[in-house]
Image (spheres, helix red, strand yellow):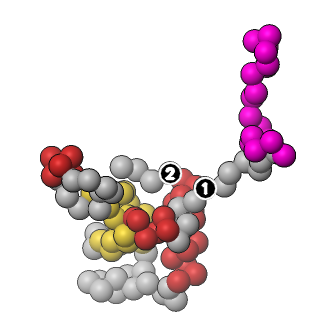
Amino acid sequence: MRIKSDQMRNLEDWLQARTRRCVCQCCDASDWEIGEIVSLLPDDLCNQMVGQRPSVVQVICRHCANVLSFDLERLKRMQVLETAKAPATAFGFPANAVIPQPNGKH
């Protein structure tokens, strides 16, 4: 599954803040790209399991294609992949929400 562009920026910022200079263990390059979200188990086995599907976010070396994997659930718990939300109003609706009126007009 592709990662959204705003989530990708958040992950890139988080990685830059957490790593000084991430050097590939295979080729010593330091040119990386965010890959996809990948499940660690086949779909048929995941369908039998209860709970979350174990998944990782790929970070791929652009020089040799070595892949680093970051645990998706842990990134979510640390709110690394959180996207900006519209500010809420006093009634709890997002400020840009369209609230239906009783007469059917917006």
Marks 2 and 1 in Cβ contact (< 8 Å): yes
Tag 2, which secondary structure? loop
- At horizontal 80% and vertical 10% (from top left) the residue drawn is 103
Instruction: Estimate how packed mark 2 is, as few (under 14), some (14 to 19) or many (20 or more) residues with alpha carbons within 10 Å.
Output: few
Q: Determine whether, in the image, residue 44 is placed left or right of residue 9.
A: left
Residue 85 x/y as whole percent: 68, 51
Amino acid type for the residue under numbered disc 2:
Lys
Q: Determine whether, in the image, residue 104 is placed left or right of residue 41.
A: right
In this rendering, is residue 14 above or below 33?
below
Residue 104 quadrant: top right
Q: For this rendering, which residue is in front, 63 or 46?
A: 46
User: Is residue 102 found inside the magenta-colored segment of the image?
Assistant: yes
Residue under pointer 2: 4
In this rendering, is residue 104 above or below 16?
above
Residue under pointer 1: 83
Q: Main secondary structure of the magenta part?
A: loop
Q: Is residue 95 visible?
A: yes
